[in-house]
Image: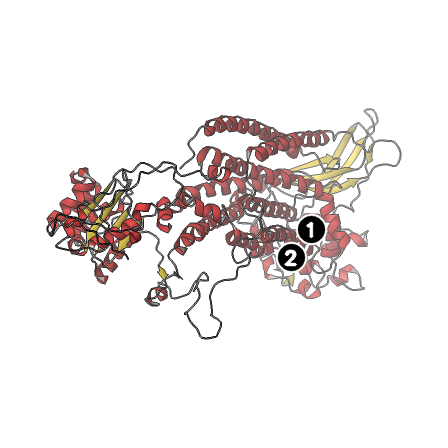
Amino acid sequence: MAMNYNAKDEVDGGPPGAPGGTTKTRRPDNTAFKQQRLPAWQPFLTAGTVLPTFFIIGLIFIPIGIGIFVTSNNIREIEGNVFMYYGLSNFYQNHRRYVKSRDDSQLNGDRSALLNPSKECEPYRRNEDKPIAPCGAIANSMFNDTLELFLVANESDPTLTLIPLKRKGIAWWTDKNVKFRNPPGTESLKERFKDTTNPVNWLKPVYELDPEDEDNNGFINEDFIVWMRTAALPTFRKLYRLIERKNDLHPTLPAGRYYLNITYNYPVHSFDGRKRMILSTVSWMGGKNPFLGIAYITIGSISFLLGVVLLVINHKYRNSNNTADITI
Amino acid sequence: ETIITLNKAKIKIWVLTGDKQETAINIAYSCNVFEDEMDGVFMIEGKDSETILQELRGKMKPESLLESDPVNIYLKKKPKRTFTMPEELPRGDYGLVINGYSLAFALEGNLELELLRTASLCKGVICCRMTPFQKAQVVELVKSMIKAAHIGVGISGQEGMQAMLNSDFAFSQFCYLQRLLLVHGRWSYNRMCKFLSYFFYKNFVFTLVHFWYAFFNGFSAQAVYDTWFITCYNLIYTSLPVLGLSLFEQDVNETWSLHFPELYIPGQHNLYFNKKEFVKCLIHGIYSSFVLFFVPMGTIYNSERSDGKDISDIQTFCLIVQTSLIWMVTVQIALKTTYWTMISHFFIWGSLGFYFCILFFLYSDGLCLMFPSIFQFLGKALSQIWLSLILSVILCVIPAFGYQFLQPLVFDRINHCKTRPPQVRVRTKLKHPSLRRSAYAFSHKQGFGALITSGKTTKTKPNKKNSFPVKKKESSDISTRIVAFQEKSISGVPSTIPLKF
């Protein structure tokens, strides 16, 4: 048995007849906090609150769902910006060892990390006795197919018009301007990456990813940045190019036959992967994704049905309870 | 009055005393440990094991002499492990009286079980003429066999501080026991159960999401949350609301608790947290984790932001799942809390707000705070994130909400007490007007004892009316009774000798 006193100990009055002095009492204070009488709100779930809640949820969700679904399905006209994506299936960019295999300080331009990449990048850390830049399995497996889109003018005239594909503006602003930086210096990019070597599976080194544009070369190459943002699911798509809306009234991609030219560098058969190309427009809600719309409609209807069921149950049991015995 | 209330809460009272039998019985009646309405009071007065065995068995349960009785089976087999007394419900209210001499036999070997079984069926048990050692033995017996949770409560009094120093709780008057048990004990049980089931639920949801994700990440144990979130989840984001729940929660306020001692019964029967409740908690956790994973997954599957850029990356996915999780467990604890003080509001909504603050801080790229970047990131994906969040929270909450609504309606009716005013207690008819009880608190072993206990000398009682409010019976107030007895042998004229104590 414990020898400790509980806070609820009370000694009423103490020893009687203490001469003159105050009697010490261990009575706890009679404050609202200590006596657990704090003013409080005590909600009680009655039929009056629960049933309307179910009906309201139903009535709100169903229109929202319909709205979302209609918006999602309306993405049809090729006006406005068109986005070209490449998609991969059965590619586990979310595997734990894969996700860890990168060096963010190297990618942020830190010189010491450039020459001495972190251990997480093993085994893609050093090659031929030189540090790999950028290191890690994520960088090593970068998607390097080239896709080109041509418009066939008409049936009789087989000339192909190249659709201009914009390669900048595809990565997140924060990634491009904060997270990824080239190593500092005034010399050329090749000089700055002097003592490093390119990843094992790359055909060209990192400073040749886009020789024409200094702002898109090296670590801040947007294709590279998009690839480094690992996908959460094994089937994913990544933004590849942007087809900008024309200023005149012509549609961005007029109706007609198109020709997609693929420079095939990226093998996926070994792990039973699939590649695909997606062209899409977007709305205020993003691309075509009927999931949210359907889900809202479903949940709204279920909620409504549940409301009805509970109403029936409530009615039945309340009637029987009214005649029940009160004393327990 | 305390004992009447405790009896209503189905708490059995055992009195272990060194006093003589008649004294003990009279005091039992006066304190309402025994009542006149009880169906029977059994006295165990045998002088040897056999008689005691017969008395114990025959009186309460004639069928305990059969072979098929579980206690008999146990006694025959003599297994090594301890025997847990099966819960048996008596068919009425009974009382048991046993004195120290018989107890000496009854505490040996096989008779222990018989004694315990018989005594457990009684509403009140008086053990009189006990030595201190026997008192300890009986307490041990009850503790080990019935496996009741035990606390020691000491009442500080004139006899000294001994009881107080050795007990878990100590106070100065017996009537405080009522408050201790019915108010604080009950609240404590309630809080503990809510805390446990919520805590398990919270962690089941948190962890089982990884089970679902495993199917999609090559079973590589990739976490669905940020590492910092995992660290802070139990420690910072969800600790204060739970603390608030377990400190301040009251299902009924103290006045009602004292008024309805029957509300104490769920605690005795382990109704609020047992294996069934745990399984319910587990199932709810599995369902919530399922929703929590698949709704965000469906949202980001093959979808983009409104400027075309990806939102199907791990970071965004983690963010959606985390935020949904925090909202979900917050709503769940908001549903569980039935007593909302200012502090509860502060803890619950404060933790949520704190999460969002930390979120903004961490997602501002930590190192260099560039405000346009945050809002740009969150803003572009905002609509999808919020839609997904609301959907997953509502989907998780609907079953819990519906169940909480159905439960009082269909499953238990104690809540009816809350909505109705206290009923006037109806006194049941007296079953055995206590003619056998004497008015004497002190007894004589020989001499006039038999005369007194035969009941011929008691005063006749006034007729009872049925609509009596809760009050002590007049007949039990011995201390003011005036005794009249007849002395046949001395003279034919009855003389009264008033006795006052």
The location of residue A29, given as percent across then percent down, is 52, 62
Q: Is residue A217 visible?
A: no
Tag nearer the camera, 2 or 1: 2
- Residue at position x 53%, y 49% from top? B221
Q: Name the residue that disc number 1 marks.
A: A203
Q: Which of the chains bears the disc numbered 1?
A: A
Q: Secondary structure at mark 2?
A: loop
Q: Secondary structure at mark 1?
A: loop
Q: In the image, is residue A13 above or below residue A322?
A: below
Residue reaching furthest right?
A248
- Is disc 1 on the same chain as disc 2? yes
Q: Along the line of sight, which residue is nearer the eye, B204 or B446?
A: B446
The location of residue A235, given as percent across then percent down, is 62, 40
Looking at numbered disc 2 in the image, what kind of residue is underneath it? Answer: Cys
Q: Which of the chains bears the disc numbered 2?
A: A
As drawn, the label of residue A223 is none
As drawn, the label of residue A135 is 2
